[in-house]
Amino acid sequence: MREGADASGLRKSRARLTVVAIVFTVAFCVVAFRIAYFALTGPASSGQDDPVLRGPIQDRRGFTLAVTEEASSIAVDPGAIYDVEQTAQLLGNRLDMDPARIVERIYQHQDRRWLYIKRQVDNLTADQILDLNLPGVYREREHRRNYPAHSLASNLLGFVGRDQTEALEGVERYYNELLLQSDPDAPSQGPTLQLTLDAFMQYRLEREMDAAFEASGSKRAAGMIMNISTGEILAMVSLPNYDPNEYYRSTAFQRGNWNIRLNYEPGSTVKVFMAAILLSENLVRPNELFHCDGEIHFRDSVVRCRNHGRVVAHGDLNLSQIIERSCNVGIIKAMQRVPRERLYHYMSALGFGSETLILPPGSGEEPGYFPDLNRWVPSTSYYMPIGQGFSVTPIQLLRAGASIASGGILVRPRVAERVLTGSGRVLNETQPIRTESPISPEVNRRVLDMMRGVVLRGTGRGANIPGMAIAGKTGTGEKSSARGYLNRYVVSFMGFFPADSPRYGALILFDEPQGDDSGGSLAAPVFGRVVAGILPYIEERTEAVEPGPLPPLPVRPPRVDRTHLYDFRGMSARDAMELIADYYGVPFDLEGSGYVYAQSPQPGTSVEQLERIVLYLDELR
């Protein structure tokens, strides 16, 4: 519906009255005909149904994350405006727009009778503009998608464009057809999609990770909290992030959900799986000692134990101490007893190299990279125990770790909880999908006790907090370019609580923090602060508890210098192409496939010298 004031409407001419009378008569006849038609044939014969209003998205307790609401567009008829400059000034003040830009657009489109100035304006602002009675200014009523919590969970939620039937990313897109179905209890409205997310947990995780992301200068970050028995994702954070209310201000890379997209070599977090394999195969005696003098050599390679860059000789360690101190030499020596066929069996059964199916097909979830047995080389059995030579996604790692904490159950992660009608009736509800892990409950309990030692005495002491026993493992994985390592790191902490009978698991990850941050010094303290923040809530929580107001969190754009060329080494082809398209806008070529190991021009080249970018890629090996 369009509303407005027109100067010509003030002139009462006989010609105008004649035209109005004719139009009115024609319209009346059309309406009368349609009434008669429907009286005979019924509404279904019209051949066109009224559009269904897109259904809302809520957290698990009914906190609104996305909702469709009435809105307005402000438009003008350039030829009907009395005073262009004054009109532009008044519109600019109320629409938060540059008046000069409005003037420019009006003069550029003098031949048009309908020119949009701003779409999807809130109705209060539109009412105020219409009250000014500006000649040639109109309102068009429409709908818009509103995300009341702004950037909260934005990289998971995705967004809808101006066309409310066309979701472009995230949960909005994966469940687009469902949200546009007719609600049986309210046919003009789509059903409500309730997610597994808890808005309060999401907020605490996002706030703590945002502070550390900024302080560390990291390029990306990912974090999750999961109910380990049901697979429900209670919080999922990706940084950089964006506000889906202003999606047009963001870039594709900025909107990436790194919990399902980031492929990285996990580093020492996988040592807990190595310990489980050793115990399952009865290859380590109780209190058997392994000696670490700081490094181990094989063929032309050497692996060292380091602490903030210094080589550390740990001496004699048993398996628990190897895990607590994250000793590379000790775990490599122990794992040489495991036949490679058995190592492959266990790691594949834990889900490495396979999608978790947390979201419907087409979500963009990466499967990670776990090499087939026929692609293993002699050094594989040395590098794999320290989390090198294969890649994972954060969601893969948390799922596998949760199987240890739960006593041997692999549960499929999920973010969709239930579908409700407008009256609250349940139309559909997802159920946990569980399979048995290859690790016995007894072995998992022993490994969990080792992880408790990591937090009490080892590299994860930063996660230790009063009032809650936490078990976990740190990781500091060097980034690979597929043809060598880059001396850049992904740091993480994976933990479970309460340690005596875990209910929750979480993973905190930062990609390329500046300085010498490690999983223990950066990610573990964030984990501890998050748990301390949600502890009173989860101990007293009922379904009736409301999180209260959630102040908007900052929007963090990517750390990309538009004046100099980015270092794409180590990135997937998809990630690199998004950055080039969003920030440089020059032609590019891909030589090979997989991950970038070299580029031309070199990183840091001035954009003024850019004519074409060539990326050289190879598969992980």
Image (cartoon, grey):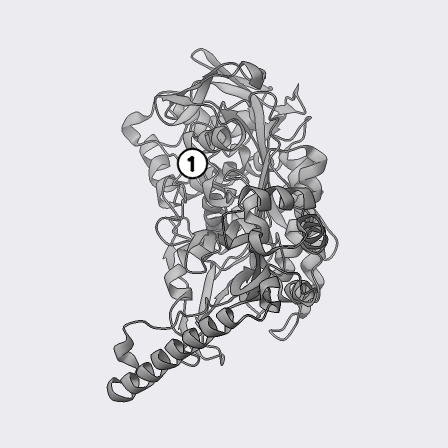
Q: Is residue 387 left or right of residue 11?
A: left
| Residue type of the residue flagged with mark 1 | Leu
> In which quarter of the view is residue 593 placed?
top left
**x%, y% of residue 475?**
57, 35
**x%, y% of residue 525?**
70, 43
Q: Name above or below for residue 620 compared with residue 202.
A: above
Identity of the residue furthest to the bottom in this view = 39
Considering depth in this image, is 534 or 335 the residue closer to the camera? 534
Identity of the residue furthest to the right in this view = 466
Considering depth in this image, is 249 or 267 the residue closer to the camera? 249
In the picture, the quarter occupied by the C terminus is top left
Q: Is residue 184 visible?
A: yes
Considering depth in this image, is 591 or 365 the residue closer to the camera? 591
Considering depth in this image, is 577 or 278 the residue closer to the camera? 577
Question: Residue at coordinates 58% horizontally, 71% vertically from top-left?
Answer: 12
**x%, y% of residue 143?**
52, 64
**x%, y% of residue 368?**
40, 37
Dot 1: what SS?
A: loop
> In which quarter of the view is residue 122 placed?
bottom right
Q: Name above or below for residue 157 compared with residue 593.
A: below
The residue beneath circle 1 is: 283
Q: Is residue 620 left or right of residue 521?
A: left
